[in-house]
Amino acid sequence: MFTELLGQPFVHTALLAGAVVAVVCGAIGTFVVARGASFAVHAISELGFTGAAGALVIGIDPVAGMVAGSLLVGGVLGVLSLSGRERDSAIGAVLAFGLGVGVLFLSLYQGYATEATNLLFGSIVGVSDRQLAELTVVAAIVVIGIAAAYRPLLFSSVDPAAAEARGVPLRALSVLIFLLLALTTAEAIQVVGVLLVLTLVITPAAAAQRLTAKPATAILLSIVIALVATEGGILLSLQQPWPTSFFISTISFAAYLGARMRTWSS
Amino acid sequence: MATFADQGPRARAAVDGPVVRVRDLSVAFGKRVLWDGLGFDLAEGEFLAVLGPNGTGKTSLVRVLLGLLAPATGSVQVTGRPPLHARSRVGYVPQQRAFDRDLPLRGLDLVRLGLDGHRWGLGLRSRDSEERVRRALADVGATGYGDTPVGRLSGGEQQRLRIAQALVSDPALLLADEPLLSLDLASQRIVVDLLDRRRRDAGTPVVFVTHDVNPILSVADRVLYLGPGRWAIGTPAEVLTTETLSRLYDTPVDVLRVRGRIVVVGTPDDGGVHHHETEH
């Protein structure tokens, strides 16, 4: 059964899509964690859901609606570049309202409920070749964006006061990272769903930074953990027909727990 | 300990005339205008302490010198250029602010960001940049924790790294904004000594913003005291007097000298005594 499934083209597509998404999520996660912006990831993701639900209502591609919703919230958060509690409460307010609108859209939508479930919990095995191509293009944009701005992104994420004094444009970089994050989130939604985006964006980065203090190594480790979780999750769900998202989040969390335990005493 | 002498000639040669030139400067926040006609020069090797109560624009002055805040009136030149174009020649030491314990950043990464953190791209290591980072760490006595995650270091160790970060680009001017906050007395001493040594060895003038004059009393050449609405500049002996501060505060203020320390009594904003922030 398992080996039969492994031969199926849709499984290959799913594994490739999972790999592409894991690389971008792992790459951006370190910056997001350093900025303390985990909650923003969740907000961008849920507003992506609102955008997708809205797209379903008016009969266009939900992925387009999702990308639009994510980019809108990402852009707004980036421009505001709030910090601390102000950001926390502002995100909470926006997130709740956006989700409320999403609920309305879903009730207006007369189509199949599976579309909504897939958005919320992911549907990696349903990825088409065209979607894989789209995922790859968007992933390339994110990775190139991070590489091109790597040093100022790192500087402004870990040490904003000194970075600003050195002429690093904090606001422009805040917009950049949030837009890249929005694209990443829209990617991750297609694999693990709206509600589990954090498991690929935040958990691997949080685990990686307990294992190394070198910034570049932390990013690479985070990518590796996201890759193992995604590919492992897909393979396990072939063996045991439980939701892929469950396996992905479990492996990701296990890596996090392991990383914490390894450094428990220090 | 190593000295900065090998970096000295470069820092020295490029500046002709005063390193900082401020004329008729004021800054406006809405209708509130700070400093009327602030003016001073800062020469090579000078240590200028910027003192004054909260809200009189000490940090704003630093931001003007960094080109991050546009003046309402007046002109500012740093190394003969507008501050915006002199940034690469300015080293900045902010106040100590704790890093997350798990932040994936080592001491030498923090210092390296001072060298090339503003440049685009991945920044592949060159032998030259490795050497400069290594030397900057050695200059502040931080070689031992270059590989330690910054979040695991003490406040004093982090401030040494921040000084190395400010010095690694061989600046022509050093700006320090409350760099002693939440440091113990021994670490305060080290921070002041490192900045003092740099300006003596390399001639790099220092603008040092602080709410407590005592840790820098022995090294400050001049004091710029920003009061509510008025300001004064001169040697510590000229400015830190009962007469001058009473005029700045527009209320009777007593400047007392107790066991080599200066205590200001009677300012409206601080309950009467300038005090150290204590470690928490």
Image (tube, coloured by chain):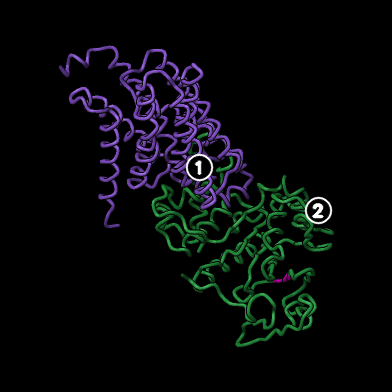
Decide which of B155, A75 is in the foreground and name it.
A75
Chain A drawing hue:
purple
- Residue that carries the numbered disc 1 in the rendered image: A154
Residue A85 on image: x %, y %: 51, 53
Q: Is residue A29 left or right of residue B31?
A: left
Q: Residue at x 55, y 31 (%)?
A: A72
Q: Against B172, is A235 above or below?
A: above
Quarter-of-image position of residue A27: top left
Give the residue type that dot 2 points to. Answer: Ala
For disc 2, the neighbor class at 10 Å (few under 14, some 14 to 19, many from 20) is some
Q: Is most of the magenta stretch helix, strand or loop?
A: strand
The residue stretch that appears in magenta: B221-225
In the picture, which quadrant includes the N terminus of chain A? top left
Please tell me whether mark 1 or mark 2 is closer to you in this view: 2
In three-dimensional space, the C-alpha distance between marks 1 and 2, rounded to whole angstroms, equals 33 Å
Q: Is residue A175 left or right of residue B81?
A: left
Q: Residue at x 77, y 70 (%)?
A: B233
Give SS at disc 1.
helix
Asked whether B114 falls inside the magenta stretch, the response is no
Decide which of B120, A201 is in the foreground and name it.
A201
Residue A57 on image: x %, y %: 48, 21
Quarter-of-image position of residue B39: bottom right
Mark seen at residue B72:
2
